[in-house]
Amino acid sequence: MVDRNDNFEARREAMGPYEQTISMLTTGHDHMVHNRPGMVVADASATVGVKWSPVTHKEEDGKKVVYRLDRQRQGKKTREVRTKIGNLWADNTIRDEGRRKVAEYRPAGVFPEVALWMYRQVADIWQADNEFAAKWASFAFGEEHKDLKVVLAAFMLVQSRKGDPVREGGEVVFFDDDFRDVGEAMCLLRRKDKRDLDAKLLLRVYQVLTLDGIAEINRELGFGRSARRPTLGRWTKVVTRWLRYREDNPKVLEGLVGAGMKEKVKELCRRVGYKPQSPKFFETLGWTQHQAKDGRRELAIGQEMAAAESWEGKTEQEICELIVREKPGYKRIVGLVPKDPGITRAIVAAAIEAGSMSDKDLVIASETLESLGLLQVQEVKDRWEAALKAAEDMRATNIAKRVKSQEVREKLEEASDGAAQKAVEEVMKDLWVHVMIDVSASMQGAIDSAKGCIKKFLHSFPEDHVFVSVFNTAGREVKIKHRSAAGVRNALKGITARGGTDYGAGIRSLQGHKPPAGTDLLMFWVGDGQHCNTFDRTFTQAVRQSGLKPVAFGFVHVGGRSQCVQRTAAELEIPCFMVAEETFEDVYAAPRTIRNLIAATPVGQVQGPAPVRQRESLVERILKTDLLKKPAWAIAA
């Protein structure tokens, strides 16, 4: 008799590249880049094995003392709390007074553990199916997940399928596929929605490829020959082309300068040793050139460039007039405004009037608008509310914690709810979701975590497509009266953890909600999976006897180590998508993860004359994606 655990492990290890892609997209992990200093500590529960936290430090008695920065809710307000961690040593370790290492200090920049984890997943998928990896990169280019695009672009630029001649009998019979072209296209193509790779992200590709762990992966895969230097593949060539195009099109280069990318462009030039065709390139960047020691430089040596633009010494009125006349971007305005007068009510109002603030800028600046009293101005309020309605992510959730007005806070929370709903609705056609929450006694310490996870995503589902229940040894349906985070919070109020565990009870509580013909069902479990081993067999039987035919399980594993949900999915021969609890700590990752999970849910097989299916699984969408092609100007270059 085959051991049930062995059967489950065999199924998990047999995952193909498609399932691995889905697993990567639905597994929680931290940001790949942190724009402020932090520290990391070992954390076995985290996907990458460590946990990052923001820190600051200050000089005390000749030592650099590190403080962790936490945000704590006190009543209706959230305040920052500083917790002393230890002293910062020269080797970037943080040690207590007994010199024991308690954490590792990290400057702002790429988070190596996350970058390495993501790159390894991509490498595993590439080894299983080269072309699928290239199609995935092509598909991801149009998505908003910047970290994933950077990692995929980096990988495609160095992988070994690069159009080499294939010989037979000493003669070239054909040329291999050139998947490095996909990486080049990701770097060179421009998009109207601005989801392309800008100068900052091109530099990030370089930073990823030069990480020691990723350089080692590339050596293992045979992508490079050097045992010392990291493999860059076509990165140098593609950045040189990127810079040449901008030099040949001065308006594009000027746009980069206006967007505050001047220093990033300079850094790209240094990394690839770019040699402009004309001094005009340096003039646009305001980059004074000095002769190198070997005398190799020829252009603009010693030529004084115009001083960098500055609004120092200008009055508030003069600055406002400049903004209305020149319409610079808001980030540039913030960079140019001197400390005196600073960002004033009049300057921000002028930026809004000039159209310098995008929808995203307005949402991010909510706290500033409130403190300056601009939300009391009807025209500004109307523009701000329109920006909230257009919000594409849930950053408003974090901003809502910092504002003072209850009205402003509620509008920000509504914007966050709306963004989550828009993210999921587009992939919910012909799909129902049953959400079942374990409230048995083993969840005593985890019930609050479970509720916290649920309230951050449940309201994003269309109300007529989702049904919710709680269960222990019995189950009951929970009605969500209002499609919002507040509505979910209210529905789960007063529910505590007690009793035994029977996952079959969760099934039976919702078996009356059978999807209509042509509609698939995803069963989404939230719990610890504990004490259900004795019910494993009845769990599987309950699914079969219910008449429900789920096409997949989703599982938010809150504590515990049991694998009964995964084992049941294996017995039913359906995928089980694991969603890490820490995913829901990130307002950006949560809706993206849920959307990817929904999109990844396979389309069921309909017997007999099938109705027209509107839903298309994520894998199907990836497989139908054409490989990206470089722009015509890059092919000719």
Image (cartoon, rainbow, N blue to C red):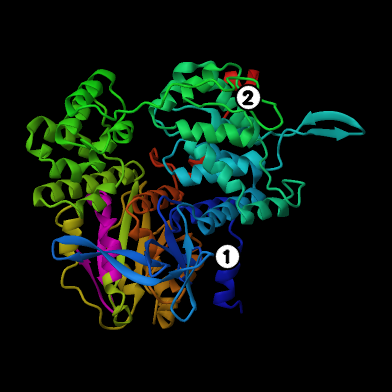
Q: Where is residue 312 in the image (x, y as percent from the top left)?
A: 29, 30
Pointer 1: what residue? 11
- CA separation in Å, label 1 and label 2: 54 Å
Instruction: Say few, some or many: other residues with alpha carbon within 10 Å of mark 1 (under 14 / 14 to 19 / 20 or more).
Output: some
Judged from the image, the secondary structure of the residue bearing numbered disc 2 is loop
For the question of whether residue 625 can be seen, the reply is no
Residue ID at (31%, 29%) = 329
The vertical placement of 409 against 496, above or below, is above
> What type is the residue that disc 1 sits on?
Arg
Residue ID at (41%, 40%) = 144
Which image quarter is the C terminus in?
A: top right
> What type is the residue that disc 2 sits on?
Lys
Task: Specify the segment rendered in magenta.
Answer: 449-478
Query: In which image quadrant can residue 60 be found?
Result: bottom left
Q: Nearer the viewer, mark 1 or mark 2?
A: 2
Pointer 2: what residue? 275
Which image quarter is the N terminus in?
A: bottom right
Identify which residue, 600 or 109, lies in the foreground: 109
Q: Position of residue 306 (x, y in %)?
A: 44, 21
